[in-house]
Amino acid sequence: AQKVTQAQTEISVVEKEDVTLDCVYETRDTTYYLFWYKQPPSGELVFLIRRNSFDEQNEISGRYSWNFQKSTSSFNFTITASQVVDSAVYFCALPLGTYKYIFGTGTRLKVLA
Amino acid sequence: DTGVSQNPRHKITKRGQNVTFRCDPISEHNRLYWYRQTLGQGPEFLTYFQNEAQLEKSRLLSDRFSAERPKGSFSTLEIQRTEQGDSAMYLCASSSVGETQYFGPGTRLLVL
């Protein structure tokens, strides 16, 4: 079965600290995509990254980086030098087929000034 | 370049009333999806369309729920005889086939 686990319900950090959000997944597929989305208080889910299971290279985009490890079925997300604007709920997602995304329960990140 | 839009953004209704939500996808996307999100949970898939055809409905979508996409552009989600358990955020997303889903701002429904 497809499943996404985000064990961290809530994380609080002080501005400028680095923080890592964990995502562990289960899938029977041999090739698949993984996603991260950000949901600020306004409610809209903002797409952050899509990763193909073929590519295990780490991805870096500004202060954001993603570590994909197939051996441990993890796709972790790190924010470097966190800012107050990073405060949001972050979701990891795994597609079931070509249309249905299975989301984790999310990690609420609070960045304190 | 406009994103996915949803209306209304907020809806408060009394139990037993009918409500209808609208979603306008990104114009070049032929797939449109509806998800429901309750407090403290991730979004859960409800249904999706490819052009005007509704191709899958989740078991979460009871007989009181109906979705349409009459011309393959905008979509509506109607809930008849609302119940308090229907209170949630209803999210719409769109994509091209096999591509990333982009989400709208959602409609927050509160059933009193």
Image (spheres, coloured by chain):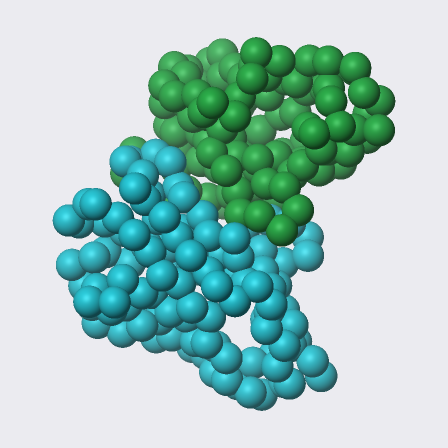
Judge left or right: residue B47 versus residue A11.
left
* Quarter residue A92 falls in: bottom left
- Can residue B106 be seen by looking at this rendering? no
Indicate the colour of chain A.
cyan
**Image vertical order of residue A14 relative to residue B55, above or below:** below
**Mark count:** 0
Q: Which of A48 and A68 is in front in this view?
A: A68
**Image vertical order of residue B81 relative to residue A82, above or below:** above
Percent coordinates x, y for residue A36 in the rendering: 42, 58
- Can residue B83 be seen by looking at this rendering? yes
Q: Residue at position x 26%, y 48% from top? A: A27
Quadrant where the C terminus of chain B is found in the figure: top right
Q: Residue at position x 38%, y 21% from top? A: B56
Percent coordinates x, y for residue A15 in the rendering: 63, 85
Q: Which of A71 and A96 is in front in this view?
A: A71
Q: Residue at position x 66%, y 46% from top? A: B39
Percent coordinates x, y for residue B102 in the rendering: 46, 44
Q: Nearer the viewer, residue A45 or A104?
A: A104
Q: Residue at position x 40%, y 63% from top? A: A23
Q: Nearer the viewer, residue B64 or A34?
A: B64
Percent coordinates x, y for residue B108 in the rendering: 71, 38
Judge left or right: residue B74 versus residue A111.
left
Q: Which chain identifier belongs to the green chain?
A: B
**Image vertical order of residue B64 relative to residue A110, above or below:** above
* Quarter residue B84 falls in: top right
Judge left or right: residue B83 versus residue B31.
right
